[in-house]
């Protein structure tokens, strides 16, 4: 089966090689150089993707503002399935979207980011498996495989360690999961009205995300969990800024789930 993410993964591997070279140039060594390199790679990628995140935030705000009108439209045409009614509803829906500045692209910004995140996943998995990627040399990969942070290597897994190693990886996973929980719990662009079916879903989702991250940490390398932590902390800070900038005018009665930037 062809690896469609190979070119992008190779590019990200080259960026990681550059980040590691920068970390060693400023005098870091041991585990610190690879921890910083992963952090730098994460920040670089998220900065490149920032315009897409901003576009997603604007769409989420517009969707939240349009939600009351969309609910009224759904109620107006409830139970009507004839072709004339469907056509009229679609025309009115389009008018509402235009009025509130909703982008026709919709979730496209989120979808465009997915290949990058999947390629980052492939990159970290390959490096922690001792494989060269992009401009990463055999020496660099060997260095990554040899690092130890309180006895934890980048290839260590939570289900295969104990004692201090278990605690270190678990703490990283909890920070990663906690950042996701805080992002979903505190920085939504809209909040469902009381009694709306989505209200219960949005209350449960942060906890499911937290549990999902911690559960996943049992089966993936510690290097990937470390990347999750940096990425999720970035998302938390980014979402806080975007909600403050683009979400202030959003009504607090929308049942729509915002795009994750």
Image: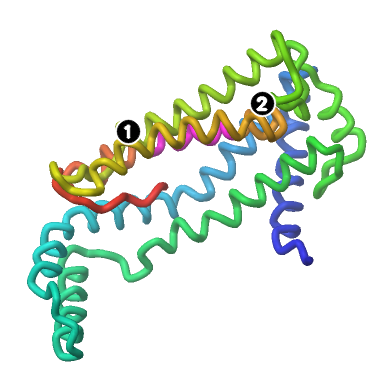
Q: Quadrant of residue 244?
A: top left
Q: Is residue 113 left or right of residue 131?
A: left
Task: Using a 10 Å C-alpha cutoff, classify the residue at mark 2 as few (fewer than 14 neighbours), some (14 to 19) or many (20 or more).
Answer: some
Above or below: residue 86 compared with residue 125:
below
The residue positioned 76% from the left and 46% from the top of the image is: 14
- Can residue 191 be seen from the camera position used here? yes
Above or below: residue 175 compared with residue 2:
above
Q: Quadrant of residue 58?
A: bottom left
Residue placed most toward the observer, 93 or 102: 93
Q: Is residue 111 left or right of residue 116?
A: left
The residue positioned 16% from the left and 69% from the top of the image is: 96
Q: Name the residue carrying label 2.
A: 36
**Label 1's element?**
helix
Of all residues, the one furthest to the right in this rendering is 138
The quadrant in which the N terminus is found is bottom right
Q: Quadrant of residue 71?
A: bottom left
The residue positioned 51% from the left and 23% from the top of the image is: 175
Expressed as whole percent of the image width and height from the top left, the position of residue 196 reads 18, 48
The residue positioned 86% from the left and 43% from the top of the image is: 131
- Magenta stretch: give its range: 228-239
Q: Name the residue carrying label 1.
A: 185
Expressed as whole percent of the image width and height from the top left, the position of residue 99 reads 15, 68
Residue placed most toward the observer, 245 or 256: 256
Q: Which mark is residue 126?
A: none
């Amino acid at each position: 089966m062809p690896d469609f993410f190979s070119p992008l993964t190779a590019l990200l591997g080259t960026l990681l090689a550059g980040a590691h070279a920068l970390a060693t140039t400023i005098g870091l060594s041991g585990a610190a150089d690879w921890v910083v390199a992963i952090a730098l790679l994460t920040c670089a990628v998220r900065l490149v993707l920032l315009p897409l995140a901003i576009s997603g935030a604007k769409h989420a705000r517009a969707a939240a503002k349009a939600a009351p009108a969309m609910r009224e439209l759904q109620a107006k045409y409830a139970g009507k399935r004839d072709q004339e009614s469907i056509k009229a509803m679609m025309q009115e829906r389009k008018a509402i979207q235009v009025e509130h500045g909703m982008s026709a692209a919709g979730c496209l910004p989120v979808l465009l980011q997915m290949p990058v995140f999947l390629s980052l996943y492939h990159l970290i998995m390959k490096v922690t498996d001792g494989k060269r990627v992009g401009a990463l040399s055999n020496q660099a990969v060997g260095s990554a495989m040899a690092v130890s942070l309180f006895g934890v290597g980048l290839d260590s897994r939570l289900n295969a360690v104990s004692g201090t190693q278990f605690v270190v990886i678990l703490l990283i996973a909890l920070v990663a999961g906690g950042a996701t929980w805080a992002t979903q719990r505190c920085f939504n662009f809209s909040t469902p009205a009381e009694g709306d079916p989505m209200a219960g879903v949005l209350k449960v989702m942060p906890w499911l995300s937290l549990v999902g991250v911690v559960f996943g940490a049992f089966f993936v390398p510690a290097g990937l969990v470390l990347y999750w932590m940096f990425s999720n902390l970035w998302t938390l800070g980014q979402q806080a800024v975007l909600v403050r900038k683009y979400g202030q005018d959003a009504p607090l009665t929308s049942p729509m789930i915002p795009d994750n930037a």
